[in-house]
Amino acid sequence: MSVRTLPLLFLNLGGEMLYVLDQRLRAQNIPGDKARKDEWTEVDRKRVLNDIISTMFNRKFTEELFKPQELYSKKALRTVYDRLAHASIMRLNQASMDKLYDLMTMAFKYQVLLCPRPKDVLLVTFNHLDSIKGFIQDSPTIIHQVDETFRQLTEIYGSLSAGEFQLIRQTLLIFFQDLHIRVSTFLKDKVQNSNGRFVLPVSGPVPWGIEVPGVIRVFNDKGDEVKRMEFRHGGDYVAAHKEGSFELYGDRVLKLGTNMYSASRPVETHMSATSKNSASRAQENIAPNPLAKEELNFLARLIGGMEIKKPSGPEPGFRLNLFTTDEEEEHAALSRPEELSYEVISIQATQDQQRSEELARIMEEFEMTEQPERNTSKGDDLLAMMDRL
């Protein structure tokens, strides 16, 4: 398992989350002069995206994110995205948040599977960052935050070997291996089967620097070619015309990681039979023991670095529905397998001096108002405390 995987996983999933939210906010957008108090306007859309992106690329948060560390459970990471999605005036209920996370994970899984080279997962990340900057063109301060993250990525990953990138890709695929959720866009484009598994292409450009398959060369002990044989590979491959740019600005060439929702079309998710059957088998990875100290440390550090914004005024925030109707949303909440429903984790930890100091620091950063004292341990219901901030 690579200890350099988490930043790439988080940034790419975060980019996919922003794509989905932007598409749904645009779909529900009402002209400002016609909007009711509880309806979305273009100003609200920009505000939501600005708030989430600003939190996502917060300096304290990225400092923790880029520290070498192993990946944690799907449920722990899902909880971080729940906090991130609610770092604005927008509010999602459980069913919509589950659907959002499904779309995020399946999109990035598809991109990782189709990367021509392991190193190209970095180009996928840069495509996400390029698109994110397009959402905040009027916010130079936030653009600077994104550019700083790009420079960190270049500094850390620019010198990694092909073997290290292969280990990162393998770590990502292990993380995604039990997820087989059907997405309407993938099904319509015939890149996903009805069982939720992706269809790998046998055509298109080969990885940069690699020849089109079809020739076997035999060399002697002096390194001279002594024989050449051709074979039919059964595909329709072409040579890559150039390598994608790893610079701050440039042509990435690779299209994986760009916004697939830019063409307006509804996107639905469905649990495949494979996912339902493997749910109990995957449960250990999705919902591990919440008393694990490493998981508590992970959440405490990452959530402690976020600046969660409260909606100003008495309004609780605007609700966004990722389904076509409220009825569909309610049905999805009732029909989703319980073991695949990512509810807020209630983490309990033993009392120790280090944990007490860590939780105290987090509460001070969030300027938490006084709450009635409860007779519980210092680490009791960490995420419940975050909900009250």
Image (spheres, rainbow, N blue to C red):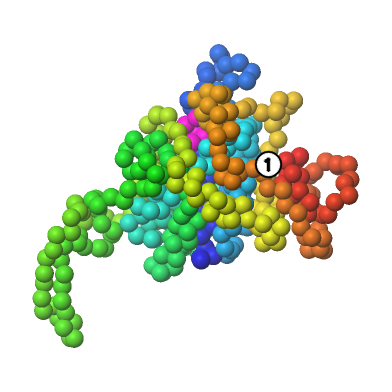
Locate residue 205 relative to residue 147 in the image: left or right. left
Picture coordinates of residue 139, whole percent (x, y): 55, 38
Asked if residue 141 can be seen in this view, the reply is no
Q: Based on the picture, tell me whether residue 192 belongs to the magenta stretch.
A: no
| Rendered residue at 55%/38% (across/down) | 336
Q: Residue furthest front?
A: 277
| Rendered residue at 63%/55% (across/down) | 288
| Rendered residue at 32%/48% (across/down) | 199
Locate residue 43 relative to residue 377 in the image: left or right. left
Locate residue 153 relative to residue 383 in the image: left or right. left
Considering only vertical position in the picture, is 233 above or below 274? below
Give the secondary structure at mark 1. loop
Asked if residue 111 can be seen in this view, the reply is yes
Q: Residue furthest top?
A: 34
Segment colored magenta: 19-24
Crowding around mark 1 (Cα neighbors within 10 Å: few <14, some 14 to 19, many 20+) is many
Locate residue 353 relative to residue 263 in the image: left or right. right
Q: Residue furthest bottom?
A: 221
* Front-lying residue, 25 or 247: 25
Q: How many numbered marks, from 0 up?
A: 1
Considering only vertical position in the picture, is 167 above or below 317? below
Q: Tell me the amino acid under the disc marked 1.
A: Ile
The residue that mark 1 highlights is 308
Q: Main secondary structure of the magenta part?
A: helix
